[in-house]
Each structure stands twice: as C-alpha cells, then as structure tokens.
Image (cartoon, helix red, strand yellow):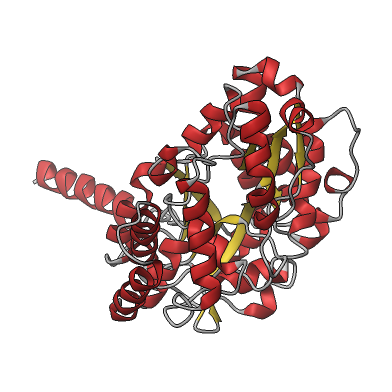
Amino acid sequence: MKKIISALIILIISLCAIYCAPKKETNKNEVIVWTLQMSDFSDYMNGVIKDFEKENPEIKIKWIDVPFSEGEKRTLASVLSDNPPDLINLNPDFTATLAQKGALSEIDKNKTIQFNQGILKSLEYNGKLYSIPWYATSAVTIYNKNLIEKAGVKVPKTYEEIGEIAPLIKQKTGTYVFLPNITENDTMLKILNKYGVNSADTITSNTSVQVFEFFKTLYAKDLIPKESVTQTHREALEKYMSGNIVLFQAGANFLTMIKENAPSIYKVTDVAPQITGKLGQNDFSLMNFIIPLKAKHKDEALKFALFLTNEQNQLKIAKLTNVIATNNKALQDDFYTKYDESDLMAKARIISARQLDRVEPVFQSSRNQKDINNLINTAVQQVLLNKADTKTILEKTAKNWGMIK
C-alpha cells in the first residue's frame, strides 16, 4: 500500500511539474525577413536588427538571406502558402506580378512620406502602393577621356548627340561610341520611356519608330558593335575596360570593378550624367520590400521596413555599397551633395543622386513585365537585323502586347 501511495505521490508531482510550472511565453511577434544576396553585409543587417529590437522589445526579427537566383521562385512558393515571411526583398517587376495576383498587402501611403516621391510613384500598381523602396541605382555615363579628346568631341548628353559623334569616334579612334545592351531586361523600354513611349498604344507611334530606326542606323553603319543584338552590360563593361568603346552607362558601383580590373583605363575615366531622351528625365533601378497578404505580422513588418529605410540606416548601407538612398533626408546629407574632384566614385554617386530629382514620367513595371520585355527585345533584334519594315514589326509587337493579360 505504501508503495502505491508513494507511486501516486511521484505521479502527482511529475504531472504538476509539467502542467503547473509557468509556461514559457512563445514569441508571437517574431517577424521573418527575407533579403536578397545581403550576406556580405551581415554586420550591417545584424546591427540594424539589434537596434530595432532594442527600441521594440516586443518584436523579434528573424533574418534569412536568400540567394538572388532563388528569390522569385522561393517568394512565389511562400506567398501562395499559408505561412509566408512577413517582409520580403524583391525587385519592382516581380512585385508588380504579385500585386496583380492579389498576393500583397497594400501599404498606407501616409506612412511613406519620408521617401522620394518619384520613386514611390514608380512602385504604384493601379494607383495603390504595395511595396517600400529600399535602395536605388541610377546609371551615369562612364567615359574614356583620352578617346573623347582624340575624337575631338564633347561628352554626349542625349541619344541624338551620340548619333552625331559616333562616326567621328569610329573614324578618329577606331573604337565604337558604346555598346547599347538594348536587348537586356527592360533596357529598351526605359529608353523608349524617355521619349514618351510606354504602352501598346504608343509603341507604333512615329516617335517610337524613330527611336528604333536610330539604333538600326547605328547598327547598319557599323557604329555600334554587332554584338549589340544580344550582349549585356557585362560584355559592355568588358569592352570598356579593354578600350574598345568610349561610353559605358552603369551605376557608380561599376567604377570599383574598372579600378580593380583595368587600372590603366580607370586613370583616364571620368563620369557625366546619364544619356537622356526627348523628355529629359532619368531612369533608375530599384530594390524594394513587400509584405505578403497572408503575413502574420504585417504591422510589425512595416515598422521594421520603415526603420531599415530611415535616414541613418540608409546612409549606413549607402556608405558600404555606394547605392543611392531612397529616403529624402538621407539624400540631403553631405554624402550625396559634396565631393572632392579627385574622388571619381563620390562624383558619380552625387550625379546619380541628383538624377532622382528628374525621373518623371517614371518607368513603371506592369503585370507580366518579363513577357513585355521579351516582346520589345525581340522587336529590337528584328529591327536591327532588318527582318521586316520597322513599322510592321512594331505593329505586330503592339498586337502581341495588347494580348498579354
């Protein structure tokens, strides 16, 4: 009997230890954040997270860095599930695709007044905002001073001026004016936007035909490399570093690559504002954050996104990477307004930042943007290779563009 009583006492004590002990609180405010290819800047990210958690002890951030090549695939799978991350770093093109599918939470515009308004406008989809801008790049014209001087020309400001100096550069230096990577991603669409061509309705306009004919003429007269039909900015960079082209349009960060891989070319390199079109505005590239519709901690995710993109944190990441902040106060800092003439990368950064003051009408990503890009890039190749009359090619392009849903 004593043994039975002892066993019962032990059982009661054990059950009490399990059920009567104070339960460990589960953190209901753990915000899961995905970034793209930011592992090299883990000290920065961990520092921001630490500062945020100190200010917001009720919120814990779980940061996961995703390889760039897997970003879209993993994001799509996650937003279709019932347990997506709370905040995801994406590009605007894929953001527009997810917005069209109704997979994203709308962002209150009243909470985004800290950002450059032109950039915000580029992120709108059907007049609504579904993302927070993180950082931008705006291409500058990187050019070879020696070749410009040898050709006896001025650095061009517009595409029309490129057409004027291209023959002189070829004649006097034996090089090409530039390699326009016009069949890469949305490059041609951004050029067309500088002329007010940005829809299926305007792609057949006289202005659009003239822009396509401009590149066709350069190609036919061997004033741009034959590889312009297929090659990307990577090949353009290689040609610039080998002294085979005079101009290269890219973000300020590419100067570091030139300095490291072609120091002799870097010594004769300078920078100028990017090439513009008839409307005079500049284009830019952007990375942003989205909050999935099924995210469990939307308010906390937005709070962290706004903290990550405040003035101080934007300046920190900009100084680490040479990207452009999207926060207005950060853009007014000396980092974006003053530079020493001998500091070429600082000069490029400041030119890039100033270009954000002139971005409207902005190029806006559309649903099925990749399909539209492919249509335009196919049209460019057909025009340059003279497969048919330019107007005919563009009429077919407009028809196919209109069918994209």
Left or right: residue 7 compared with residue 132: left
Q: Residue at x 65, y 62 (%)?
A: 306
Residue nearest the observer in this picture, 321 or 260: 260
Residue in front for this viewpoint, 205 or 293: 205
| Residue for point 34% across, 64% down | 375
Q: Residue at image x 45%, y 47%? A: 220
Using the rendered image of the protein, determine whether residue 30 is visible from the camera's viewpoint. no
Q: Residue 127 occupies which quadrant of the picture? A: bottom right
Is residue 61 depicted above or below 306 in this figure?
Answer: above
In this view of the protein, which residue sits in the foreground, 368 or 19? 368
**With 224 as the anchor, is 111 left or right in this view?**
right
The picture places residue 294, in percent across and down from the top left corner, at 37, 71
Q: Is residue 68 left or right of residue 61?
A: left
Q: Quadrant of residue 148?
A: top right
**Circle count:** 0
Residue 157 seen in this snapshot: yes
What x and y, as percent, mark residue 174? 60, 27
Q: Measuring 59% from the left and 70% from the top, which residue is drawn there?
A: 122
Q: Where is residue 186 shown, x and y percent of the image?
A: 47, 58
Query: On screen, 243 above or below 225?
Result: above
